[in-house]
Image (cartoon, rainbow, N blue to C red):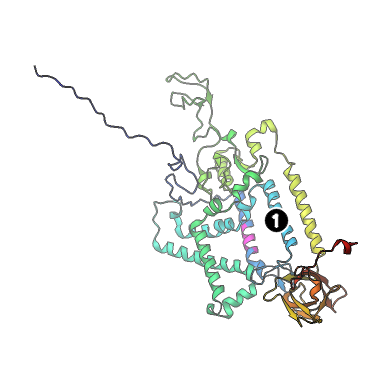
């Protein structure tokens, strides 16, 4: 018999499953503006006209008019609000403020931030959904233009949109973006200067201004035509501050899960373990038919949410409000109008999605109604009152002029008649005088106690302007200690009203290095 040789069986190796890695595909969608595979998810929300939408329309167009008109309004011959970066001044209701007023600006900025904290604690993200220029222009200017040009192709991919509609839409976007760029620039350069740049001269005479205008227009196009809601979710930090600015009793837009779940399109009964959903002969009214072995012991009716997804389709951030509080939510109330319209058609109470608080939604039976008085609602107003009080005091005691000492450029001092008994050191002090009034003023610069000047300076400063001068301080070499001498200069307004300006500037001038010997024991005695 032939000898049988058995060979070992070699099995093919199965591909090993790679270990979990932070670079692997995440489970589900990371952001509302991204698909599961990481591609951009373009949002085209359907408008939901309702009570909240009508209120937002009124507020939005009032704000658009305010944004556009304010730079053209003048108070006492000056713009009502002007953030002049070029001339480094801030005009507010006819009063001019300079960057040198550091304390006042610091207090005002802190007041603005504290006001935002208080507003958020009271009404949630009402700024984002109701007043932010990004939301106002996106939802009430650019999206209506897009819906008008695309027609039925705006929300349905089945309807092809001709190329000329896209071209016309982007042309309209460009015109609106140019208008917004001019409106924005008017806040920073003034309406009069902007008008001169546009109509009185060609762009070639103002290349820098035209370059800024063109750049801002392109940025507007990029933002409102492409980047859109991603600015709120990826760039703006306000949404990420919600965890610190909001508490469980803050006003938010929320979904009533206890009332809406379990969601479904039909009012059929289900079981808590999910074993039966009306497929075993149940009649959905408390009894079970034959089949499936269902005894009806765990019978449960559907909630008010019919899972129509209208709240998702109308959301400009692309989120599902039923998933809870999310950083992309801007509290625009579109989901409230969409859900209320569905509940009205079905004959059910409205308010399934409503303005409420997390505490009211999650444990209202335990904690009771929403708290009206909370710690932060006491701390924030107290802080705001103190800051506004300090700002009011600074404004009430604000002088009509300001004096500041600048860094000296070039040679700091000159030695005259060196080596003689009449040796004198002339030190330079560079000063700036800001005239905060609208009338031209004359100021006299003199030396303080023991300080002599080469000559007294009479300086004329135009209204709402500043002027820099060099003052020469004369000193003996022996008056310097290690090359420095402390001096005080006085600035007095000449003539004018009875309440004239009297200011001073304390500084140190530079001179020759003179080291004074230490006192000996005998001299000390």
Label 1 environment density (alpha carbons within 10 Å; few <14, some 14–19, many ≥20)? some
Q: Nearer the viewer, residue 507 or 36?
A: 507
Asked if 465 appears above or below 24 in the picture, the reply is: below
Say if residue 331 shows up in the picture.
Answer: no
Where residue 329 appears, as percent x and y from the top left, is 57, 47
Magenta-tinted stretch: 60-66
Residue drawn at (61%, 38%) of the image? 349
Q: Residue furthest top?
A: 1
Q: Quadrant of the N terminus?
A: top left
Q: Residue furthest right?
A: 525
Q: Residue furthest front?
A: 522
Q: Which residue is mark 1?
A: 112
Asked if 271 appears above or below 35 in the picture, the reply is: above
Residue drawn at (43%, 42%) of the image? 25
Q: Quadrant of the C terminus?
A: bottom right
Secondary structure mostly seen in the magenta stretch: helix
Q: Is residue 345 left or right of residue 359?
A: left
Q: Quadrant of residue 249?
A: top right
Where residue 430 appears, as percent x and y from the top left, is 73, 74
Where residue 172 appears, as percent x and y from the top left, is 49, 65
Magenta region includes residue 468: no
Say if residue 368 shows up in the picture.
Answer: yes
Residue drawn at (43%, 49%) of the image? 39
Q: Nearer the viewer, residue 196 or 20?
A: 20
Q: Nearer the viewer, residue 359 or 327?
A: 327
Asked if 255 appears above or below 173 in the picture, the reply is: above
Q: Quadrant of residue 401?
A: bottom right
Where residue 295 appears, as percent x and y from the top left, is 49, 18
For mark 1, give the secondary structure: helix
Q: Residue furthest left?
A: 1
Q: Nearer the viewer, residue 48 or 63?
A: 63
Q: Is residue 442 left or right of residue 289?
A: right
């Amino acid at each position: 018999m032939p000898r049988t040789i058995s060979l070992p069986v070699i099995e093919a190796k199965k591909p090993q499953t790679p270990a979990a890695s932070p670079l692997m595909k995440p489970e589900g969608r990371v952001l509302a503006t991204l698909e599961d595979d990481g591609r951009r998810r373009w949002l085209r929300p359907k408008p939901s006209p309702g009570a909240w939408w009508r209120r937002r329309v009124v507020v939005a167009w009032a704000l658009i008019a305010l944004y556009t008109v304010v730079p053209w309004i003048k108070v006492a011959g000056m713009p009502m609000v002007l953030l002049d970066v070029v001339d480094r001044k801030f005009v507010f209701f006819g009063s001019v403020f300079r960057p040198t007023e550091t304390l006042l600006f610091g207090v005002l900025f802190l007041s603005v931030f504290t006001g935002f904290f208080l507003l958020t604690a009271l009404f949630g993200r009402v700024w984002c959904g109701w007043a932010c220029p990004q939301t106002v222009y996106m939802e009430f200017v650019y999206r209506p233009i897009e819906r008008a040009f695309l027609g039925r192709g705006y929300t349905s991919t089945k309807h092809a949109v001709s190329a000329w509609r896209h071209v016309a839409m982007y042309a309209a976007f460009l015109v609106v973006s140019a208008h917004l760029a001019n409106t924005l620039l008017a806040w920073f350069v003034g309406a009069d200067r902007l008008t001169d740049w546009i109509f009185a001269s060609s762009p070639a005479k103002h290349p820098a201004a035209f370059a800024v205008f063109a750049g801002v227009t392109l940025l507007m196009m990029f933002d409102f035509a492409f980047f859109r809601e991603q600015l709120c979710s990826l760039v703006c930090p306000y949404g990420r501050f919600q965890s610190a600015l909001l508490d469980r009793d803050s006003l938010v837009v929320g979904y009533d899960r206890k009332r809406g779940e379990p969601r479904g399109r039909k009012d059929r009964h289900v079981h808590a373990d999910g074993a039966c959903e009306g497929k075993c002969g149940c009649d959905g009214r408390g009894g079970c038919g034959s089949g499936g072995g269902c005894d009806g012991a765990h019978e449960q009716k559907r909630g008010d949410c019919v899972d129509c997804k209208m709240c998702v389709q109308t959301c400009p951030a692309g989120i599902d409000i039923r998933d809870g509080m999310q950083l992309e939510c801007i509290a625009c109330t579109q989901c409230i109008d969409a859900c209320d319209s569905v509940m009205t058609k079905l004959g059910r109470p409205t308010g399934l999605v409503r303005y409420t608080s997390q505490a009211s939604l999650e444990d209202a039976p335990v904690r009771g109604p929403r708290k009206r008085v909370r710690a932060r609602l006491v701390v924030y107003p107290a802080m705001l009152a103190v800051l506004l009080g300090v700002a009011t005091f600074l404004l009430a005691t604000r002088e009509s002029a300001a004096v500041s000492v600048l860094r000296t450029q070039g040679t700091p001092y000159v030695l005259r008649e060196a080596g003689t008994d009449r040796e004198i050191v002339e030190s330079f002090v560079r000063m700036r005088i800001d005239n905060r009034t609208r009338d031209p003023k004359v100021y006299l610069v003199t030396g303080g106690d023991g300080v002599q000047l080469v000559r007294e300076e009479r300086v004329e400063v135009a209204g709402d302007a500043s002027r820099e001068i060099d003052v020469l301080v004369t000193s003996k070499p022996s008056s310097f200690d290690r090359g420095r001498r402390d001096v005080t200069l006085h600035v007095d307004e000449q003539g004018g009203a009875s309440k004239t300006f009297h200011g001073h500037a304390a500084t140190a001038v530079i001179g020759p290095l003179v080291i004074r010997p230490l006192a000996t024991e005998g001299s000390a005695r």
